[in-house]
Amino acid sequence: MSPQTTPVTLEAVTRKIQRIEEAQAIQNLISLETYLFEAREHEKRFALFAQKTPGLTVELSGRGVFEGVESARRTIVDTEKMFDESHGRAMRTTYADVQFPCDAAGRLDTQLTGTPMIEVAGDLETARAMWIMLSAWTTTMEGTWGAPEARWAWNKAAADFVKEDGEWRFWHYVRNPIFMTEYTQSWVDRSLKAPRMPQQMHFDMHGAQPDRLPSKQYSPYSITRAPSLFPPPPEPYETFADVEPYSY
């Protein structure tokens, strides 16, 4: 006698296909956010974040937690514009005989996303994901560095997503570096220098205060830090009430 099997229904197949399509849409959203970041399209990037759903939180590079739409705008749009303006002033000072078409000229901030894990809720109302990002950038800051420097970093990112008007949006987003260093320096040497906390560096340069300190401060690489599975990869779930937010 053959083992008993659960009959496959059209409804079950349709739902499975829908979850696959939603996961692909999440992957496209993650990738689009990185392309807009590289292009310094701050307003378009901000539009990918939840504007209508309560509880929006954004944590980037240890800057702290920015809660709500207006606060999230400070770190996604205003702070990045200040970085561009500071870069532009530094470039014009360093290269006085060069004509620059805009403040962001000569700036590179590109991110390669990989190893994504995406879970769409059983009720299709929310989704969760985590991924690794390899970042490379060339930038300079007024009063901080002279000529532009090549730098790079590995980041770990995690996010909860929610649908607004039928489109997926970032809802709780946290991204912090595993290491960050000059291109010519190893992450081991960099870690031994024990740099200041990222949020203190951010306050010193721009004074954009967060609503509170990071809720999920990922420990950067250190010769004394043991590897860990943090944040935990997303697992299958039915509704968002069943999980703990990646940032809150």
Image (spheres, rainbow, N blue to C red):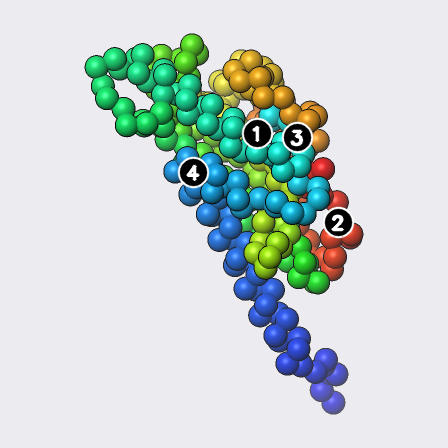
Mark sitting earlier along the chain (2/4) = 4
**In the structure shown, which secondary structural element does the residue marked by tag 1 occupy?**
helix
Q: CA distance from mark 2 to mark 4?
A: 32 Å
Q: How far across and how far down the image is residue 43, in percent?
A: 48, 39
Residue labelled with disc 3: 65
Q: Which residue is mark 4?
A: 41
Q: Which residue is mark 1?
A: 74
Q: Residues within 10 Å of mark 4 (few under 14, many from 20)?
A: some
The residues bearing labels 3 and 4 have C-alpha atoms spaced at a distance of 22 Å
Q: Residue at x 36, y 15 (%)?
A: 90
Q: Is residue 98 left or right of residue 232?
A: left
Residue that numbered label 2 is attached to:
243
Q: Position of residue 104 (x, y in %)?
A: 36, 28
Cβ–Cβ under 8 Å for marks 2 and 4: no
Q: Earlier in the sequence, mark 1 or mark 2?
A: 1
What residue lies at 53% left-to-right and 33% top-to-bottom?
76
Residue 183 or 74: which is nearer the viewer?
Answer: 74
Task: Name the amino acid type tagged 2.
Answer: Val
The residue type indicated by label 1 comes to Arg
Disc nearer the start of the sequence (2/3): 3
- Residue positioned most to the bottom: 1
Please identify, in this view, whether the residue under mark 2 or under mark 4 is nearer the observer. Answer: 4
Report the side of 119 relative to 105 (left or right): right
Query: Could you say where residue 108 lies in the image, as x and y percent from the top left?
Result: 37, 31
